[in-house]
Image (cartoon, grey):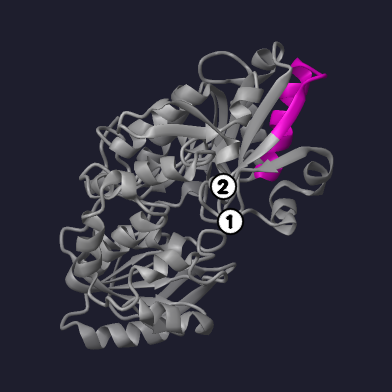
């Protein structure tokens, strides 16, 4: 049979013999039984029926300075659709409001002008005030108390300037926060680097509840919720997208009620049962562009495969990684230490207050590599980096499958087309 896996803006294809397929039900299928609506209409309906009963227009009426926190270029949030609708609502409530859009980049690099234009559209970039968060600039930060984990909460000081804080985002399964969206606009979105690092410490990453689809007793999630409340986040618009990155659902209103509803929707529609037998080989991806722009982000896609592959099996990940590794520090954790057990052990010895950027991604990758050999289908220019980290470079999915067959005795093959867009039911905790 033919296997098709997202890769950059296209796909990787290969032929495979008798295999079992595991994939999320296509979200678009859920719309076939109801009236089809355009993407803008879905968001408009969410804004018209906000969770908590208070409209964005209503809360903006008493606000003269509005901070709209938006996602950066690494997130497939349909900001071209969401942000204009939010701006219209705010200005309908208060035509004279001063609005600033803050790009919640967390620890990521700043978005380029081209990336901002691609994401928001030329009109927004030209006519609105857009600022980019810099997590390393202490002069930009203000302290907002102590997190449940014990770390200091430091956030972008624009929250002091604003008398109304709102955010946009999207909800999908997240490999250690449970779900993306909602409170993540604040932490890590506009948090100080030290705050982000403390929240992503080795102890929390190793916690059994910091997994895809789990919010209950998840210490990383608990810190994030505290941060959103401390920042004064009052309204969100979060969407859910299908495999083609089209909006299929939207949730607006109270940050906590709307996010909870969105997570419940994702959990119901994107959960699939874990196979009774573990696979020898799992083929997956990071969902294509923009989530597979770098190797750092692609660790996310590996975790769904990790939960289904047998010990000493093979994971094949297809990811273009057009921006390379995504961080030198991430790569250095593995350089000269080809044994992932050693990487894991070294990271677990780091106390929370000494957590370093990218440590958590290296920790999770080490955990994945302790379970299975990773074959990475990517661009040729990434070969040296991939192999320096203890993975195997593969030029195509076909080559990767051929090589994988030489590494295992049986050929139970599992295909997860989008590793970041699915929840394996074993890892789901009901809210």
Q: Is residue 417 above or below residue 95?
A: below
Q: Is residue 398 above or below residue 238?
A: below
- Tell me the tag on residue 352: none
Q: Are marks 2 and 1 in contact (CB under 8 Å)?
A: yes
**Image quadrant assignment for residue 363:** bottom left
Please give the name of the residue rendered at 65% of the width and 32% of the height, measured from the top-left corner: 68
Please give the name of the residue rendered at 54% of the width and 39% of the height, measured from the top-left corner: 190
Q: Is residue 130 above or below residue 244?
A: above
Q: Secondary structure at mark 2?
A: loop
Q: Position of residue 200 (x, y in %)?
A: 35, 46
Gap between marks 2 and 1 measured at Cα = 7 Å
Q: Nearer the viewer, residue 279 or 370?
A: 370
Q: Nearer the viewer, residue 25 or 321?
A: 321
**Image quadrant assignment for residue 81:** top right
Quarter of the picture holding the C terminus: top left
Please give the name of the residue rendered at 72% of the width and 23% of the height, measured from the top-left corner: 89
Q: Does the magenta stretch mainly form a helix, a strand or a loop?
A: helix
- Tell me the tag on residue 105: 2
Q: Secondary structure at mark 1?
A: loop
The residue at which mark 1 appears reads as: 109
Q: Is residue 168 visible?
A: yes
Q: Position of residue 266 (x, y in %)?
A: 41, 40
Numbered range of the magenta stretch: 79-100
Whether residue 359 sits left or right of residue 312 in the image: it is right
Give the class, few, some or many, for how many residues have Cα within 10 Å of label 2's Cα (few <14, many ≥20).
many
Whether residue 89 appears in magenta in the rendering, the answer is yes
Q: Position of residue 34 (x, y in %)?
A: 54, 36
Q: Nearer the viewer, residue 191 or 183?
A: 191
Give the class, few, some or many, for how many residues have Cα within 10 Å of label 1's Cα (few <14, many ≥20).
some
Please give the name of the residue rendered at 48% of the width and 77% of the height, measured from the top-left corner: 378
């Amino acid at each position: 049979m033919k296997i098709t896996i997202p890769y950059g803006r296209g796909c990787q294809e290969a032929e495979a013999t008798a295999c079992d397929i595991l994939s999320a039900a296509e979200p678009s299928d859920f719309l076939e039984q109801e009236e089809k609506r355009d993407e803008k209409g879905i968001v408009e309906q969410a804004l018209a029926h906000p969770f908590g009963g208070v409209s964005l227009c209503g809360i903006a009426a008493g606000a003269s300075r509005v901070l709209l926190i938006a996602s950066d270029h690494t997130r497939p949030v349909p900001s071209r659709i969401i942000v204009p609708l939010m701006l219209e609502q705010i200005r309908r409530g208060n035509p004279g409001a001063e609005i600033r859009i803050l790009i919640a980049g967390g620890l990521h690099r700043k978005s380029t002008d081209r990336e901002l234009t691609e994401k928001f559209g030329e009109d927004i970039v030209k006519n609105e005030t857009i600022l980019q968060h810099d997590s390393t600039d202490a002069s930009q930060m203000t302290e907002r108390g102590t997190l449940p984990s014990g770390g200091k909460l430091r956030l972008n000081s624009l929250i002091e300037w604003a008398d109304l804080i709102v955010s946009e985002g999207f909800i999908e399964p997240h490999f250690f926060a449970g779900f993306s969206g909602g409170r993540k606009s604040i932490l890590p979105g506009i948090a100080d680097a030290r705050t982000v690092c403390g929240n992503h410490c080795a102890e929390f990453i190793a916690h059994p509840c910091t997994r895809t689809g789990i919010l209950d007793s998840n210490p990383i999630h608990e810190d994030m919720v505290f941060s959103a409340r401390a920042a004064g986040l009052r309204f969100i618009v979060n969407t859910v997208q299908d495999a083609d990155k089209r909006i299929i659902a939207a949730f607006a209103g109270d940050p906590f009620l709307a996010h909870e509803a969105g997570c419940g929707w994702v959990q119901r529609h994107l959960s699939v049962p874990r196979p009774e037998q573990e696979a020898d080989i799992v083929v997956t991806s990071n969902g294509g562009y923009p989530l597979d722009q770098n190797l750092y982000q692609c660790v996310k896609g590996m975790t769904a495969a990790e939960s289904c592959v047998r010990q000493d099996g093979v994971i094949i990940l297809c990811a273009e990684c057009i921006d390379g590794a995504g961080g030198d520090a991430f790569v250095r954790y593995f350089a000269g230490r080809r044994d992932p057990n050693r990487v894991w052990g070294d990271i677990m010895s780091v106390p929370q207050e000494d957590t370093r950027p990218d440590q958590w991604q290296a920790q999770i990758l080490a955990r994945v590599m302790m379970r299975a050999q990773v074959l990475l289908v990517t661009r040729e220019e990434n070969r040296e980096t991939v192999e320096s980290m203890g993975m195997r470079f593969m030029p195509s999915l076909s080559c990767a499958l051929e090589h994988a067959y030489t590494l295992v005795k049986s050929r139970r093959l599992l295909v997860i087309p989008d590793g970041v867009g699915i929840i394996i039911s074993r890892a789901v905790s009901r809210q």
